[in-house]
Image (spheres, rainbow, N blue to C red):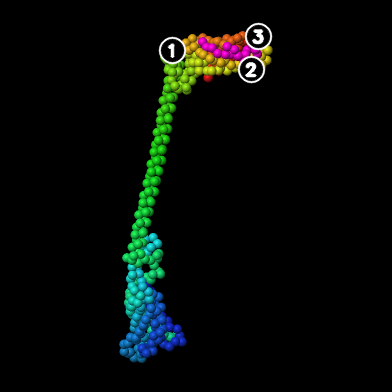
Amino acid sequence: MVRPAALGIAVTLMAGLAPVLPARASDLPIDRIRAEVSRLVPPLWTVEEVTADPIPAPAPDGKAAAKSTESRTAVRIGARLRLAKPTYAVDSRDGAVTFIRPVAEAGLEKTLTATALATLGPNGWSARIELRNPEVLEGIGQPLEELPGRPVLAGSAEANRLRDQIARDAEARGAEEDARRRREEDLLARQAAATRAEEERAAAERRQEEARATRIADLRARILGADRPARIAAYEAALGGNDPALRQIALEAALQSRDPVLGTLALKDWIARRKAVPVQLYATKEDPHSETVLNNLGPLTLEIDSVNPVNGAFAGRLGAPGYSIAKPSAAIGTLAQTTLTVNAYGCALSLRLTEQQTLDGLFRCQTLPALIARVIVD
């Protein structure tokens, strides 16, 4: 494509040469003109033949006109051009593949016409060449090496194969994209379902916690209420259930109620659920020997074998390893109101329920000083 060819182009012929554009056709330097024309056309074209003919000037009028005619000459130029390479146009593009269609074959001939106005100056002849039909150089496409991507001739077997392959690749990409989108949607759906399930589980737990807190508060209120039959019924209902926590809460509330009947029921249930009850011993200030006895006595334990839930009587063993009189031996005990009494060979344990949910009292053996005893009701 020769965009500048549409404009007038000045060509200056260097000094030292013969006059480039004389008035006589026989003196015209065709080779020089041909070189200038070749410079004006794109390299895709080969200049085959150039003709240059003077354009007759009007008859001179006087000496001044004759002088002007001798110093300026108009020339008509004709150039036969031949296309050196086949040219193509882009039909379409798909990725790295460019589908092309032929525009012109190599050997296509065009005739380019131009005019030149030559002027003789101090350094020789100069001429301004103006193309008359530059459009013959336009719209012929591009050579193969100037096309982008991988050029493939449209309509050829290779083009059809590539188009089929491109279509299959596009279909595969579409299927892969659909599969990826379905996987993402499935993942999002699973995540949403997991989130909903977790929210529902948390909501269910909150409801259960609220319901349980309500049951616990109701149990405490009923056991600590003013109506004894309601207190006893609430306590027995808690004991009859399969919830260890509610049983423990009922036990604590019964012991806090200061109701001797509830306290006795709670202690009976408490001791019936124990196999062994550790007894904490402390020295008394009244007997200075009690500290020595305490250190030598060792741990005192009440072992429970059987309990009568009606009258609170129980049987088991009581004792400590330190002294022969206090060694573990068969024992019987009773729960009367909130008082626990245990008798063993030569020793006795007497305890009473306190506000701190402990059983406090004394441990006595025949030949030993009395010691303070405590059992924690838990």
Residue 229: image x %, image y %? 42, 12
Is 269 placed above or below 24 here? Answer: above
User: Residue flagged by tag 3: what amino acid is it?
Assistant: Thr
254, 378: nearer the viewer: 378
Please rate how many residues cluster around mark 2, counting C-alpha atoms within 10 Å: few if below 14, some from 14 to 19, many from 20: some
Is 321 placed above or below 171 here? Answer: above
The quadrant in which the N terminus is found is bottom left
- Quadrant location of residue 128? bottom left
Is 215 placed above or below 20 here? Answer: above
Closer to the chain start, of discs 1 and 3, is 1
Residue stretch rendered in magenta on the structure: 313-330
Q: Secondary structure at mark 3?
A: loop
> Disc number at residue 228?
1
Q: Secondary structure at mark 1?
A: helix
Question: What residue did someone put label 3 on?
Answer: 367
Write the residue at 43% across / 12% down. Answer: 228
- Quadrant location of residue 168? bottom left
Residue 197: image x %, image y %? 40, 35
Q: CA distance from mark 3 to mark 2?
A: 16 Å
Question: What residue did someone put label 2 on?
Answer: 298
User: Residue flagged by tag 2: what amino acid is it?
Assistant: Gly
Q: Which is closer to the viewer, label 1 or label 3? A: 3
Q: Is residue 305 magenta?
A: no
Q: CA distance from mark 1 to mark 3?
A: 45 Å
Closer to the chain start, of discs 3 and 2, is 2
Please rate how many residues cluster around mark 3, counting C-alpha atoms within 10 Å: few if below 14, some from 14 to 19, many from 20: few
Q: Is residue 322 magenta?
A: yes
Q: Secondary structure at mark 2?
A: loop
